[in-house]
Image (spheres, rainbow, N blue to C red):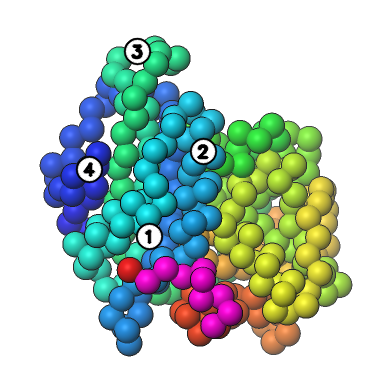
């Protein structure tokens, strides 16, 4: 990464000079997205995955901070496309747009303008991870504030990941404030039981993930698998046939262990692996009926 975008300018990363005095830096009042563009060596271009969905969620996130985000979808995509071409990382690319309250100084509720910054980071293709997981003590609120992406919310993810690491595990699994399974530290969660696919409902406080939504759509429409969104106690995970996680940057990854329960990851009929293979085919442009999920840059 050589360049980023901030408030209308493409500039070298070492010249980015957003002040530490801005409200967002001091109080976590910024909205952001995690997006991905998949690179095709054969076609020599990048394909942005579901940008309309990410833009829509970013608008929802900024609205929660009383920011009237005025950049149009077309302008948003144009800025990302220009930035990716300027950096010219011929790999899959992670994109991080941030919209932040830019008022300087102390004071949480002062009226504030906003700034926009976008940076990219290459993500070389890698195999899915197999995680050792544990339940953690942090709890996800269920009032809707965690269904969007606000920077302040991710302190909870930091604490949950740190707790899991300190316990000797790879990933932490959070429950909601009322004791139901919510999500992993930075990924949505699914589990398979009796050939059906289950995932915590948004009422349990997980992020309304774009990849989560894509998995539900693909499993239902392409694999004929019933997907049930609901409220599940932790015991359901320990009794499940499979547990897997998904996110924009991370893709689909598998639970090898949750607490003392170990999972068999050699099953050739694994539903998680079928979904992973299908999602990979879609993001690589090999499933024509989902071509509208990809925007060529």
Q: Indicate the quadrant where residue 136 lies.
A: top right
Q: Would residue 13 be found to the left or right of residue 297 on screen?
A: left
Q: Which mark is residue 61?
A: 2
Identify the mark at residue 106; answer none if there is no mark: 3
- Indicate whether 145 appears above or below 282: above
Disc 1 to disc 2, C-alpha distance: 19 Å
In three-dimensional space, the C-alpha distance between marks 1 and 3, rounded to whole angstroms, equals 32 Å
Query: What residue sits right under mark 1 in the picture?
Result: 94
Q: Nearer the viewer, residue 102 or 66?
A: 66
In percent of width and height, residue 24 lies at: 37, 28
Magenta span: 288-296
Q: Earlier in the sequence, mark 3 or mark 4?
A: 4
Q: Which residue: 33% across, 68% down? A: 297
Mark closer to the chain start, 1 or 4 = 4
Task: Residue 233 in the image: state x and y as whole percent.
Answer: 82, 48
Within 10 angstroms of label 1, few (less than 14), some, or many (20 or more) residues? many
- Looking at the image, tell me whether mark 1 or mark 2 is earlier in sequence order: 2
Answer with mark 4 or mark 2, whichever residue precedes in sequence.
4
């Amino acid at each position: 990464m050589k360049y980023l975008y901030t408030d209308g300018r493409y500039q070298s990363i070492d010249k980015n000079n957003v002040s530490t005095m801005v409200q967002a830096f001091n109080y976590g009042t910024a909205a952001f997205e995690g997006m991905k563009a998949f690179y095709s060596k054969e076609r020599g271009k990048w394909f942005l995955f579901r940008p309309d969905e990410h833009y829509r969620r970013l608008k929802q996130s900024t609205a929660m901070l009383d920011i009237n985000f005025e950049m149009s979808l077309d302008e948003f995509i144009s800025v990302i496309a220009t930035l990716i071409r300027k950096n010219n990382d011929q790999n899959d690319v992670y994109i991080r747009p941030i919209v932040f309250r830019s008022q300087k100084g102390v004071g949480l509720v002062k009226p504030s303008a906003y700034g926009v910054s976008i940076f990219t980071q290459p993500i070389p293709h890698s195999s899915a991870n197999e995680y050792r997981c544990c339940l953690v003590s942090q709890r996800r609120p269920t009032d809707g504030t965690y269904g969007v992406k606000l920077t302040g919310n991710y302190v909870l993810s930091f604490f949950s990941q740190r707790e899991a690491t300190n316990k000797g595990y790879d990933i932490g699994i959070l429950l909601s404030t009322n004791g139901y399974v919510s999500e992993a530290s930075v990924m949505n969660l699914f589990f398979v039981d009796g050939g059906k696919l289950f995932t915590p409902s948004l009422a349990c406080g997980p992020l309304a993930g774009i990849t989560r939504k894509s998995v539900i759509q693909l499993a239902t429409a392409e694999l004929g698998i019933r997907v049930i969104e609901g409220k599940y106690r932790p015991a359901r995970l320990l009794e499940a046939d499979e547990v897997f996680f998904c996110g924009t940057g991370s893709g689909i990854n598998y639970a090898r262990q949750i607490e003392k329960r170990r999972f068999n990851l050699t099953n050739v009929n694994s539903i998680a692996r079928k979904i992973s293979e299908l999602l990979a085919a879609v993001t690589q442009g090999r499933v024509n009926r989902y071509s509208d999920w990809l925007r060529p840059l």
